Amino acid sequence: MNWGAVRAIFNHEMARFFRTITQSLASPVISTVLYFVVFGAAIGGRIQAVEGVAYGAFIVPGLMMLTVLQQSVSNASFGIYFPKFSGTVYELLVAPAGWAEVTLGFVGAAAFKAVIIALIILLTSFFFVGMHIVHPLWMLSFLILTAVGFSLLGFIIGLWAKNFEQLQVVPMMVITPLVFLGGAFYSASMLPPFWEQVAKLNPVLYLISGFRWSFFDIADVPVGVSLIAVALMIVVLLAVIRWIFLTGWRLRE
Amino acid sequence: MPPIIEIDHLSKQYGSGTRALDDVSLTIDEGEIIALLGPNGAGKTTLISIICGLVVPTGGTVRVGGHDIRTDWRAARKLIGLVPQEIALEPFEKVINAVRFTRGLYGAAPDEAYLEQVLRSLALWDKRDARCRELSGGMKRRVLIAKALSHRPRVLFLDEPTAGVDVHLRREMWQVVRDLRASGVTIILTTHYLEEAEDMADRIGVINKGRLLLVRPTADLMGEFGRKQLTIELDAPLQHLPEDWAATGLSLSDGGRVLTYDYDTRAERTGIGRLLADLNARGLGVRDVATKQTSLEEVFISLVSDRAEVTADVEPSGADPQEAIIAAEGRA
C-alpha cells in the first residue's frame, strides 16, 4: 500500500476545499438557514410534533443527510472528474498507486469535507431549535458511513462522466429527489400505507431513518436494517470501483 | 550492466481493430538517449503509454529495471517519469505544490532541497509560487518535466517534448534534455522533429504503422542512409552537360556555373575522384567545392517509404518482419 499517494491525493483535495472555503461553507449553511426559516419557523409552527419531536428539530437529521449526500457526491465526482477534464489524470495512472490508494485519497477527502459541513450545519441548527442527541456516537458513525458511501457513488459518477452535464445530472435528477422522498422532512409513517411501502424501496429512507434514530431514538425502519443498507452500499460500490480500475473502463485504453 | 528497459514482442490492438503496435522488441541501456521517430499515428505514443501504464498491451512483455510492468508494476513505475505530449496541469495549482503532489504520488518522502534543485535546474525556482495558469507555454512544459523528475526517476519519457513550441524554446528544451542525460537519467523521447533526434539522440528508432523498422546509433544511421551532395562552382559557365555525364547524377544550375553531384556515402565508389579528374581532363577550372549532408528528414522519408514497400512484399511469407525487411533489402 502506497500511503504516500493516499496522503498526497487527500491533501491535494483538501487544499482545493480550503482554497474555496468561503463558497464551500457559506452555500450549505445559507441553504440550511433558509430551510429552517421556511420549514422550521414559517411552516413548522403550524405542524404538530412528529412522534413527539418538534418539527423544527425533526428535520435536522434530514437536512444534514441532504447536505451530506449532495456534498459527498459532488466533492468526489468533481475530484476525480477534474483531473480527467484537465488531462492530469495521467499522473494517477502512471504512479505506483493502485485503485485502493486513489479511491482512499479522493473518497476520504470528499467524505471528510462532507462530514465537516454536516457538523457545521448541526451547529447552525442549534441556533434555531433546541435538541438533544440521544446516540451521539451512532450519529457520528452514520454520518461517516453515509458520507463514505455517497462519496464512493460520486467517485463512480466522476469516473463515468464524459462532460460537466453528466457530472450534474445524477445529483440533480437522482440524489435530491431520493432525499426529498426519503423522509428528510417527514416520517414515512405519515404517508398513506401504499406510499409508505413505495417509500421503503428508496435506499435513502434507510439512511435518514437510521440517522434520525441516532438523534431521537425513533425510526421508520429498524436501525440494524439501516446499518446493513449502508454497509452493503459501500461494499457494492467498492467492487464497482475496483472493476473500473482493473479493467481501465473510461480510464485506460 | 543489464538494460534498463527490455521490450519483448510487444503488441497492441485497439477495440476498433486498429493495430497500433506490432511485435515490437527493443532494449534500452541505462544512461542513453533514444529517439523514437515516426509519422503521426505510427505507434510512438502507444509504445511509451504501455511502458508507463496508460495503455494495456494485447501481447508481449516489458521490463523496466528488471521489473515486469504488469506483474511488478509498482516497482517498475517508481523508476519512470513521464512528460506527456499535451500540457496537462491544474490551472490554479502553484508550481511548487504541483511538483510536491507528483512526488507524493510516488510515495517519496518530502525533500524540499531536491525539489529546489530540480526547479532551479529548469529555471522555475522564481516561479515556484506562481499558479500554473500564469505561466508561458515553455514554462508549463518545464513544470511537466519538473513533476516527472520529482521522484528521481531513472528513466524519463518525453512524448513530443517540443511539439508546437518556437525555435528558441526548442533549443532550450534540448539543453534541458542534455543536462538530464548528464545527470545519468535514461531518456526516451518521441518526436517528429528529425533535427531534434539527430542533434540529441545516441540511437534512433524508426516506427511506422506500429512496427519498429530499425534502431541504429544516430551516427551510423546518418552514415548508412545519408546521401551527400557535392557542389562545384566552375571558373567559366558550361553551356550544357556533356552527354556522357547525363546518367551520373550530375546537374547544372546558376547559368551553368554550378555543377551539383548527388552521391551515396554507402557506395563502394562515390565517383568524386573520377568526376574531378574528368573536369580536369576537359579543361574546366574549379573555383570552389562544397559538400552537404542529407538531413535526417530526407533519410527518414526515404526509409519509411522504402520499408513500407518492402514490408508489403514480405508480409505473406510469415517471417519475422524485421529480419524479412533486412533480408529483402539485402536482395535488393
Image (cartoon, rainbow, N blue to C red):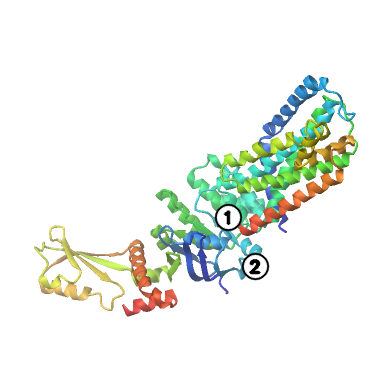
- Chain of the residue where label 2 is placed in the rendered structure: B
Report the front residue among B138 and B160. B160
Residue A140 location in percent, x, y?
Answer: 83, 41
Estimate the spatial distance between the alpha carbons at disc 1 and disc 2, rounded to whole Å.
23 Å
Q: Residues within 10 Å of mark 1 (few under 14, many from 20)?
A: many
* Residue type, label 1: Ala
Name the residue rendered at 22%, 73% in the picture: B272
Q: What residue is pinned by disc 1? A: B148
Residue B106 visible (yes or no): no
Q: Note whether B9 is above or below A191 in the view shown.
A: below
Q: What SS does tag 2 mark?
A: loop
Same chain for the residues under marks 1 and 2 in the image: yes
Secondary structure category for the residue under label 1? helix
In contact (CB < 8 Å): disc 1 and disc 2: no
Q: Is residue B26 above or below residue A95?
A: below
Q: Give the residue displayed 10% in from the left and 72% down from the top.
A: B282
Q: Earlier in the sequence, mark 1 or mark 2?
A: 2
Q: In the image, is B156 to the left or to the right of B270?
A: right
Residue B269 vs residue B22: left or right? left
Quadrant of the image for the C terminus of chain A? bottom right
Q: Quadrant of residue A14?
A: top right
Where is residue A142? Give x, y as percent. 82, 42
Is residue B312 visible in the rendered image? The answer is yes
In the picture, the quarter occupied by the N terminus of chain A is bottom right
x, y percent for residue B38: 41, 62
* Residue occupying image coordinates x 21% and y 75%: B273
Q: Nearer the viewer, residue B273 or B27?
A: B27
Residue, far left: B239
Amino acid type at circle 2 is: Thr
Few, some or many residues within 10 Å of mark 2 (<14, 14–19, 20+): few
Task: Look at mark 2 in the image and give the residue it sits on.
Answer: B71
